Image (cartoon, rainbow, N blue to C red):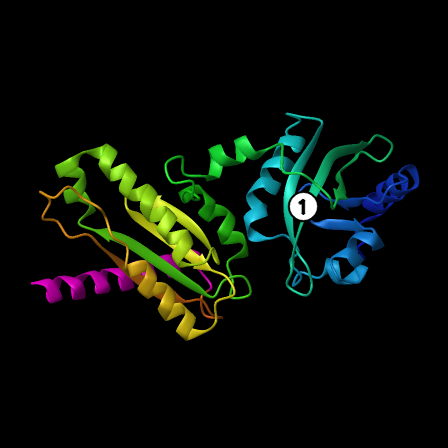
Amino acid sequence: MIRESANHAERYTIKRLVTANISPIIVSDLQGKLLYVDNSYASVLGYKQNELFSPNVVISHPDSLGLNKLARDALIDQIIDEISIDKAYLKKNGDILNAELKMKLYFDKVNLQKVLVSRVNYASEKRCLNDLYALAYCDALTGLYNRNYLSIVEHIFSPSFYSYMLYFDINKFKQLNDEFGHQFGDQVLIDFSRHLRSATNDLGTHIRLGGDEFITLLSGVRDQKLLTEMVRNLESFKVITPSSCSTKVSVSVGVVPINEQSNSLSKTIAIADTAMYCKKRHLRRQNS
C-alpha cells in the first residue's frame, strides 16, 4: 500500500520498485517517512497497512533509532551502497520483535527520485554497524549510553515510551577519586552501572551524562510500589573501599514522572536534577 500523501513522482518510483522486486519491500523517503509498506510486513507487526502511515503509530523501538539514523545517513551520503542492521520493532500488542533490516538507496533516473528501499529478515543475527553505533552513542567505560544518545531520545520522548526519569549522583565520589585515584574511581562507576541495570531489572534506558551523574528512563513501570522498590535498591549501592577509608558513599536519586505535561526532555532532566539535589541536601542534614 502506498501512502495517500505520496506525490506523483514518489508513486511512479514505488510502482517501478514493486514491479521489479519479487521479495516484499518497504519504501521510505530520505527522512525515514514510510511511503510504501508490504502487507506481510504490516501483518507481522500486528497492523493493517494503512495504520502504519499514521503519525501516532511508532514501530521502531527507541534503542534502535540511533542505529537506524546512522545507517540512513551513511546511505544518503553514499559512504556505502547497502547496509544491514539489527533492529528492534514494537508490535501493536507491545511485544518486541528483533529483525535484520537491509537498506539500500535507490535512484530512479527516469523520475529523478531518491528513496530508501528496505527488506526485513525476521530471523536475523546481530551484526554490521555495532562498532560505529557504539562509538557514537555508548560510554566506553560503563557500556551505558552516553550524552549523545539524548539526541535520539529527544525525538521519541513521550509518556507512551517512558513512565519515569531517574537522575543519579554518587555522593562523595570526588573524595574517593582524590584519595584512591582515577582507576579506583573508574571501577566505582563500572560497578554502579552494573548495579543500575540489576536494580531496575533492565526496564530502562540508562545514560551516563558524565562524571558520576546518570539518568534512567524507565519503560513500562507504572506501579508505584515497584518504583519505590527500585529506588530503594538503587540507593543500596555500596563501595568496597580499603579499611583506612572513612568516606561513606551513597547514591542520591531524583525521581520525576513522565506524563502529558512532560513535553521537553531538557526540562524534565532539569526537574529530575533538582529533585536529586533536594535528596542530596536531605541526606547531608541527616548525617550532620
Q: Is residue 1 magenta?
A: no
Nearer to the camera, 216 or 235: 235
Magenta: main secondary structure: helix
- For the question of whether residue 222 can be seen, the reply is yes
Image coords of residue 280 (percent x, y): 20, 60
Q: Among all residues in the image, which is located at the extreme left?
A: 288
Residue at image mark 1: 32
Helix or strand or loop: what does disc 1 sit on?
Answer: loop
135 up-or-down from 213: above or below: above
Q: Residue at x 41, y 42 (%)?
A: 146
Q: Tell me which corner region of the image, top left, top right, bottom left or bottom right, holds residue 199.
A: bottom left
Q: On the rendered structure, is 204 left or right of 169?
A: right
Q: Amino acid at mark 1?
A: Gly
The C terminus lies in which quarter of the figure?
bottom left
Image coords of residue 53 (percent x, y): 74, 58
Nearer to the camera, 238 or 137: 238
Q: On the rendered structure, is 130 left or right of 53?
A: left
Q: Among all residues in the image, which is located at the extreme right?
A: 19
263 up-or-down from 117: above or below: below
Image coords of residue 240 (percent x, y): 22, 46
Q: Among all residues in the image, which is located at the extreme front?
A: 243
Q: Residue at x 58, y 47 (%)?
A: 65
Nearer to the camera, 61 or 251: 251
Q: On the rendered structure, is 262 left or right of 10?
A: left
Image coords of residue 237 (percent x, y): 28, 55
Q: Residue at x 17, y 42 (%)?
A: 176
Q: Tell me which corner region of the image, top left, top right, bottom left or bottom right, holds residue 42.
A: bottom right
The N terminus lies in which quarter of the figure?
bottom right
35 up-or-down from 16: above or below: below
Question: What range of the chain is rendered magenta?
Answer: 263-288
